[in-house]
């Protein structure tokens, strides 16, 4: 084989590899959205300002930031752990435990440790669904409505998250049991 043929084969392999990575990432998210188990998480408002990432509604899922751990293990920043999921009587999910080994069942999310508070024996983790991206024009109004519905008294804002094999994908943000986009459209038509 000539040098030219080897170069073309090498270039072809490089192109396939560069296309395979983003395609597999997209496929993983889409497969999770289609076949993953749905969990609902209550939310609380957060300041969403970020000039570099575009418009979004910033989310703080309650019950997921500081999780009690009673296993006597020491955790370090950046460590991958698996948060076990449970659902309460109202149908909302929370983290019920943590393990360093991948569980055999589907009801867990792989996350990274932010810090381990050994005094309170709680674990703070980075959840993979803390932003709901949407249309640039609708995002400021959605943020205002979301904050209004996350305050004490109302607290009827939540997100649905699809989970498959430890991978979590934010599916929808709800306000008053309506998807946020539908809620905003219904308010405009009033």
Image: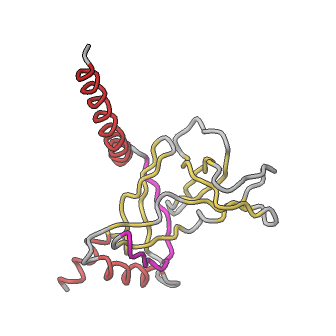
| Residue 168 on image: x %, y % | 46, 51
Residue farthest top in this picture: 1
The boundaries of the magenta stretch are 37-53
Q: Nearer the viewer, residue 20 or 42?
A: 20
Against 175, residue 76 (above or below) is above
Residue 125, picture quadrant:
bottom right
Against 15, residue 119 (above or below) is below
In the image: residue 50, left or right of residue 2: right
Q: Residue at x 55, y 38 (%)?
A: 105
Please identify the quadrant where the C terminus is shown. bottom left
In the rendered image, residue 107 lying in the magenta stretch gets the answer no
In the rendered image, residue 48 lying in the magenta stretch gets the answer yes
Residue farthest front in this picture: 3
Residue farthest left in this picture: 189
In the image: residue 69, left or right of residue 102: right
Q: Residue at x 59, y 62 (%)?
A: 64
| Residue 73 on image: x %, y % | 78, 49
| Residue 20 on image: x %, y % | 33, 37
Against 9, residue 169 (above or below) is below
State how the image is colored: secondary structure
In the image: residue 120, left or right of residue 163: right
Q: Residue at x 29, y 33 (%)?
A: 16
Q: Nearer the viewer, residue 154 or 44?
A: 44
Q: Residue at x 29, y 39 (%)?
A: 19
Please identify the quadrant where the N terminus is shown. top left
């Amino acid at each position: 084989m000539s040098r030219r043929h080897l170069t073309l084969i090498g270039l072809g392999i490089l192109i396939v590899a560069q296309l395979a990575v983003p395609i597999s990432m997209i496929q993983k998210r889409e497969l999770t959205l289609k076949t993953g188990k749905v969990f609902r998480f209550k939310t609380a408002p957060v300041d969403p300002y970020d000039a570099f990432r575009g418009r979004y509604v910033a989310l703080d899922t309650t019950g997921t930031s500081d999780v009690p751990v009673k296993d006597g293990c020491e955790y370090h920043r950046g460590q991958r752990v698996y948060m076990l999921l449970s659902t309460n009587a109202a149908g909302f999910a929370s983290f019920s435990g943590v393990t360093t080994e991948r569980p055999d069942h589907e009801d867990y999310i792989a996350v990274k440790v932010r810090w381990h508070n050994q005094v309170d024996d709680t674990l703070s983790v980075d959840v993979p669904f803390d932003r709901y991206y949407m249309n640039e024009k609708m995002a400021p109004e959605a943020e205002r409505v979301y904050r209004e519905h996350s305050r004490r008294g109302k607290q009827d804002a939540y997100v649905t998250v699809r989970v498959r094999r430890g991978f979590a994908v934010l599916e929808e943000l709800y306000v008053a049991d309506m998807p946020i986009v539908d809620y905003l459209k219904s308010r405009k038509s009033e």
